[in-house]
């Protein structure tokens, strides 16, 4: 246990470190263009351009205009609509949203596992059984 830091202080430091790591890993993609399925999901999707259209995405297939569906993602559709309202068709805004969501989910999962295991920063580490994992003793 670290001296001088409260559990809340260690949790805050861990949260900042994990969020910073996620941001550093994904930050190079902020300048990337739209790619692959972004044409159908963003650039040519009229439903994300109005509030009414965005609400309609809750009851529709994510890919507009395609009859072969089964790709229902209402949160992604609404996120794209929010990004369009904030950033228009500038890819960096959509990428920024994804980077922030990745960082937030990483922190939430870490905190969830820490709560479940009571191990704080070691939440993702292998569980301690108190026994050695070696099958044979060292000589």
Image (cartoon, grey):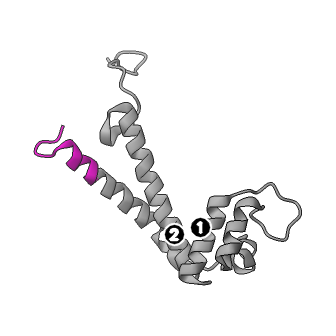
The magenta-colored residue range is: 1-13
- The residue closer to the viewer here, 2 or 75, is 75
Element type where label 2 sits in the image: helix
Query: Residue 120 in the image: x percent, y percent?
Result: 31, 39
Report the side of 86 relative to 122 (left or right). Answer: right
103 to the left or right of 10: right
**Left or right placement of residue 31 versus residue 4 in this view:** right
Badge 1 marks a residue whose secondary structure is helix
| Image location (x, y in percent) of residue 10 | 23, 47
Q: Quadrant of residue 38?
A: bottom right
Residue 123 visible? The answer is no
What residue is rendered at 75% in x and 80% in y? 44
> Residue drawn at (72%, 75%), measured in percent from left and top?
47
Occupied quadrant, residue 119 = top left
Residue under numbered circle 1: 79
Name the front one of labels 2 and 1. Answer: 1
Examine the structure image and report whether residue 99 is included in the region drawn in magenta. Answer: no
Q: Are marks 2 and 1 in contact (CB under 8 Å)?
A: yes
Depth order, front residue of 91/131: 91
Numbered disc total: 2
Q: Nearer the viewer, residue 50 or 15?
A: 50
Q: Position of residue 1 (x, y in %)?
A: 18, 37
- Residue 2 covered by magenta stretch: yes
Residue 119 in view in this figure: yes
Does residue 86 lie above or below 54 as drawn? below
Residue at the (77%, 66%) spot, across then down: 63
* Of the image marks 2 and 1, the number of the one nearer the N terminus: 1
- Location of mark 2 (residue): 97
Q: Residue at x 11, y 42 (%)?
A: 3
């Amino acid at each position: 246990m670290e001296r001088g830091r409260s559990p809340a202080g260690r949790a805050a430091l861990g949260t900042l470190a994990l969020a910073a790591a996620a941001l550093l890993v994904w930050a190079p993609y902020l300048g990337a263009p739209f790619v692959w399925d972004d044409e159908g999901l963003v650039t040519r999707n009229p439903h994300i351009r109005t509030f009414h259209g965005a609400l309609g995405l809750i009851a529709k297939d994510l890919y507009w205009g395609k009859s072969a569906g089964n790709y229902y993602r209402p949160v992604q559709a609404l996120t794209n609509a929010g990004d369009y309202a904030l950033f228009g068709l500038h890819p960096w805004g959509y990428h920024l949203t994804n980077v922030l969501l990745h960082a937030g989910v990483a922190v939430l999962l870490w905190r969830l596992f820490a709560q479940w295991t009571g191990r704080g920063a070691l939440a993702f580490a292998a569980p301690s059984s108190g026994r050695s994992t070696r099958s044979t003793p060292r000589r």
